[in-house]
Image (cartoon, grey):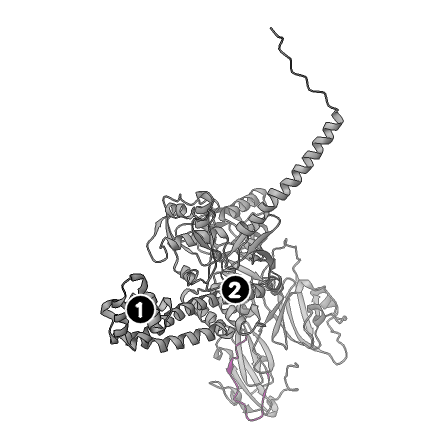
Amino acid sequence: MAKKKQPEKPKRADSSNIVGLRAEVLEQQITDTLEINYMPYAMSVIVSRAIPEIDGFKPSHRKLLYTMYKMGLLNGGRTKSANIVGQTMRLNPHGDAAIYETMVRLSRGQGALLTPFVDSKGNFGKVYSRDMAYAASRYTEAKLSPICAELFRDIDKDSVDMVDNYDNTMLEPSLLPTTFPNVLVSANTGIAVGMASNICGFNLTEVCRTTIEYMKNPDHDIASTLLAPDFPTGGELIYDPGEIREIYETGRGSFKVRSKWRYVKSENLIEIYEIPYTTTAEAILDKVAELIKSGKVKEISDMRDESDLSGLKLAIDLKRGADPDKLMAKLFKMTPLMDSYGCNFNILISGMPRVMGVREIIDEWVSWRTECVKRRVYFDLSRKKEKLHLLYGLKKILLDIDKAIAIIRNTESDAEVIPNLMIGFGIDEVQAEYIAEIKLRNINKEYILKRTEETEALEKEIADLEDLVNSRRRIHNLIAKELEAVIKKYGTDRRTAIVFSDEIETYTEAETVENYHVTLFLSRDGYFKKINDQSLRMNSEQKFKENDGLRVSFEAENVSELLIFTDRQQVYKVRASEFEDTKASALGTYLPQFLDIDENESIIDMVLLGDGRGDLLFFFENGKAARVPLSAYLTKTNRKKLTGAYSDKSPLVAIIPLPEELDLAVYASDGRALVFNSSSLAPKTTRNTQGVAVMALKKKAILTGAKPLAQSAIANVSRYRVRSLPAAGALIRPEDAEEQQLSLEL
């Protein structure tokens, strides 16, 4: 028996060569993987998943909505969400969980969009809640919202390209022919490979109105009609013109949104009922609880979530003596009750991602929508031309109906009917087919005459459509008309309020300010002095520059808040504690420089604001006076400057603080004066009210001064007192004349 041959042992290779070989193979495999697998994956995520296109939708949104449209859910009743998800799988090669999550975000119940596209029934969760989970698809129902009619209008008229689905078994639209710029209306967030997109939503009415104005004038000021972003969760947008301008121009930037709240005095609690779009109720509760536990917030005794079917509500119980305004300013700084929204307007244009400003987005949308309208018009035009062509053939047989019948009757073969009609009447095959298919009962002159009468109307319609398709102006007018219809039918008010950044009170750690009695002085040239009692007792003689003098002085506290009025209808708010104590022998602080007032603006008066009780009386050259509550100048913020401090209709003559009702003396340039009680003037709600007529002035006369009667030189009061206003007053007697005419130098 032959001995079995043993297999040869493999030769031992040099280890150095093996290491080098493996390194070379591994390097080649990584390169191949990146080139063959990773790059197509990256492009697929960018183009087919994460970045929205000019119609405002990602592919997952578009596939879901188109499936619902083909299911007849635009005008029909609701169906189970599970049914919709299953049908969508024919277009969307993803699992049911991903498709259903897409539906949830588009639903009215979730509240994630300003204009929801899915009319939902059942629990779809809430965008403002992290823990409120949506119900399973077998429990909820849905159909398309009415506004979806604007997404699919004329989709069957070749207005957009139809492409094969992933397995080439059916067609789907590459884009939806939206009649409004949904790309700006619907908020969209997507993270791709190497890039991302974060588009905030805008109000539908404002977007449509801005687009209309842009088509009229490409240089239109976008910010004048598109005020600011708008969110379904409401809140207050902190409006900074520079930030908004940067977002509108570049498509990048950020802004802040804060919660809306109200103080319930009877229960000593704060109710938060709207929060920023980017946060959740649970995140806010967690952060506040953390601050309370660490001892950074001591004013809160309890905080809870009282949200119910009526909407969001977070309740904060306050400890006795807590200031709700200061507490909320602190919470805005330290919690997500105020949050930032970062914008990155990255949109796919013809398959290429581009970061664009609002003007550029609107321009791209108008160009794309113009093309959609042209394709729709071409579709209608071709159909009308086809019909007109058939009617031309029908018109020819009108000349001899009997001949047409005879041709058909005398033709032996069915296949020869069409050629014989073509030869007999000089018509083409399409016309002959149309004539041959006419029913026997319709071969009469009345029927044929009615059909041929349509020829003239069709010719006019075709001429109009040909003019329309070649006229950019007419197409823009048509788009604008459709936008107006969208505004009228679906337009809504803003949900997110706009608050200017200079009105916002920012939280700062409280500083200990010593409080003591002071006397304040303001000169005519705008020099301010704060002198304590001890210094004033040592020297009370005030020093002023040459040709300057005292304008106003009064006693106050070091923590008192002051109103500095200027001749430009502006008022600056400062505290006495902001100024150093000085002496009577010093000139003081030059207020125009300290307050950084505008060029050619002059200070005209200073008033003690106090707690806002009482009124201010403004007297104007035209004889009118306005009574404005001091509380109109109180703000919840640290604003240093208020515009519209008083009316600009006539030059201001005098400002008189009115802590209580008193008699007043008013003077005119023609030597007249009158006396009346301040109770004759009713307070007005607005600061810049024009007031009411007090002095009936003679021709060319003006009101020159006003002061409390106790400070005037009038001795014979009854001569000048009037019962009703306005009044002309009486000529001033020498014994009642002032030593110098009272006036307010402006």
Indicate the secondary structure of the residue bearing disc 1. helix
The tag on residue 517 is none
x and y percent of residue 122 in the render? Answer: 37, 48
| Whether residue 447 is visible | no
Q: Mainly helix, strand or loop, the magenta region?
A: loop
Q: Residue at x 43, y 54 (%)?
A: 65
Check disc 2 and report the residue beneath it.
Answer: 368
Q: Quadrant of residue 412?
A: bottom left
Mark sitting earlier along the chain (1/2): 2
Q: Where residue 505 sits: x, y (%)?
A: 59, 59
Q: Residue at x 30, y 66 (%)?
A: 436
Picture quadrant where residue 701 is located: bottom right
| Quadrant holding the N terminus | top right
Along the horizontal axis of the image, is 150 left or right of 405? right
Q: Residue at x 49, y 78 (%)?
A: 681
Q: Find the residue positioned furthest to the left.
A: 441
Above or below, comparing residue 221 to residue 81 in the picture: below
Q: Residues within 10 Å of mark 2 (few under 14, many from 20)?
A: some
Instruction: Identify the residue at image location x=25%, y=67%.
Output: 409
Image height check: is 230 above or below 17? below
In the image, which is nearer the foreground, mark 1 or mark 2?
1
Where's the C terminus, which quadrant? bottom right
- What is the span of residues highlighted in magenta in the rendered image? 688-705
Q: Amino acid at mark 2?
A: Trp
Residue 698 painted magenta: yes
- Residue 373 appears in the figure: yes
Q: What's under tag 1, amino acid-wise?
A: Ile
Q: Viewer-proximal residue, 449 or 231?
A: 449
Mark 2, secondary structure of its residue: helix
